[in-house]
Image: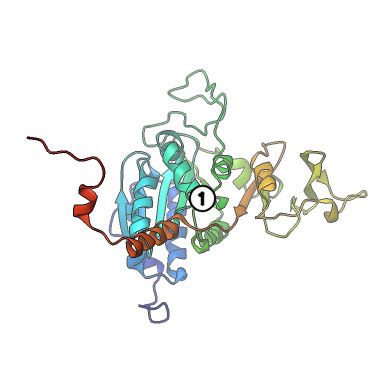
Amino acid sequence: MSQSTAPQLSRKDFVSDQDVRWCPGCGDYAILAQVQKVLPELGVPRERFVFISGIGCSSRFPYYMNTYGFHSIHGRAPAIASGLKAVHPELSVWIVTGDGDGLSIGGNHLLHVLRRNVDVNLLLFNNRIYGLTKGQYSPTSEQGKVTKSTPVGSIDYPLQPITVALGAEATFVARTLDVEAKHLQAVIRQAHDHRGASFVEILQNCNIFNDGAFEEFTDKDKKAETQLVLEHGKPLVFGKNRDKGIRMRGHRLEVVQLGNGISADDLLVHDETDDALAFLLSSMKQPEFPLPIGVFRAVNRPPYDVAINAQIRQAQEHQPADLDALFNRGDVWEVG
């Protein structure tokens, strides 16, 4: 069925008949709502969407989407998604994971789905805590975090999901927030439109075990001063009065106040194809710097599923399958 003849879909078409079992007030509700709003606009038949998850609060996502789905095992959603996309490249495959599922037991699988550039969309919900297992620290919890498993404070240095994705050379890397509806929708659309592995970190509030973790960046009276919205081709400007910016000083970034001889021309201009800039932005620590949200990196590279299927076709054309010959090739012997 062509997109022009496909039936018009709405958010209701993507809402399943399952009771949503997240805690009241959880940020996952907001993410679910925006995904269900965006999918009907993508021009893809509903039966071609697949949501695959691992273990955790976020991993209940497939139950609530009226699409195909797979609630898999801890950390292994990227491996299952890779196999599915390789044999069914026509599908729109989405991975839903959390900071624990994706960066702890699933860290190895996450790295490889990104470096291989499998054409899937990976949404990582980051609430800096283990929610499903009731409040232990996670790989993204800040140093000194007091939890049930770190009663005197975590001594671990936290992983930065964006930096990890960039290190794996993911071809699309972005960050957004659960409560920024329009921004979240825009990033989801961009992730879908990208050919290759899309990695989206979504900062998500766990109001039971880590409430207010991102309040500095979501509070309506503060966020203009604490968020840096990345826009390709535009200078890095922020602030309630758009009077602050980011410029390069030597080999380091710095925050500057516009005026007194400093203008937008002195600021860095965001370039989604600039790997060095993406790494610098991902390393900006708060509260010294604002929190960058938006697309850090978007580059083109042949997707894994396209390459592997081309390789298979080429092998079939040049060497037709002969199982008997394969079984008896090389060193063989008979057992008497």
Query: Residue at point 54% right, 61% down?
Result: 190
**Tag 1, which secondary structure?**
strand
Which residue is situated farthest in the right direction here?
261
Find residue 336 and report its image quarter. top left
Query: Residue at point 82% right, 44% down?
Result: 256
Q: Position of residue 193 (x, y in %)?
A: 51, 64
The 10 Å Cα crowd at callout 1, few under 14, some 14 to 19, many 20 or more, is: many
Query: Residue at point 69% right, 42% down?
Result: 280
What is the count of numbered marks? 1
Which residue is situated farthest in the top direction here?
152
Q: Is residue 204 above or below residue 7?
A: above
Instruction: Specify whether residue 133 is in view.
Output: yes
Question: Disc 1 designates what residue?
Answer: 199
Please name whichever residue, 214 or 264, is drawn nearer the observer in this view of the structure.
Answer: 264
Please name whichever residue, 302 or 92, is drawn nearer the observer in this view of the structure.
Answer: 302
Please name whichever residue, 54 or 273, is drawn nearer the observer in this view of the structure.
Answer: 273
Q: Quadrant of the N terminus?
A: bottom left
Query: Residue at point 56% right, 46% down?
Result: 169
Q: Position of residue 314 (x, y in %)?
A: 38, 62
**What color scheme is it?**
rainbow
Instruction: Specify whether residue 222 is in view.
Output: no
Which residue is situated farthest in the bottom direction here?
5
Q: Position of residue 167 (x, y in %)?
A: 57, 41
Q: Is residue 90 above or below residue 327?
A: below
Q: Is residue 225 above or below residue 131?
A: below
Q: Position of residue 237 (x, y in %)?
A: 75, 52
> Taking 206 as reference, is 257 left or right?
right
Please name whichever residue, 50 or 304, is drawn nearer the observer in this view of the structure.
Answer: 304
Residue type, label 1: Phe
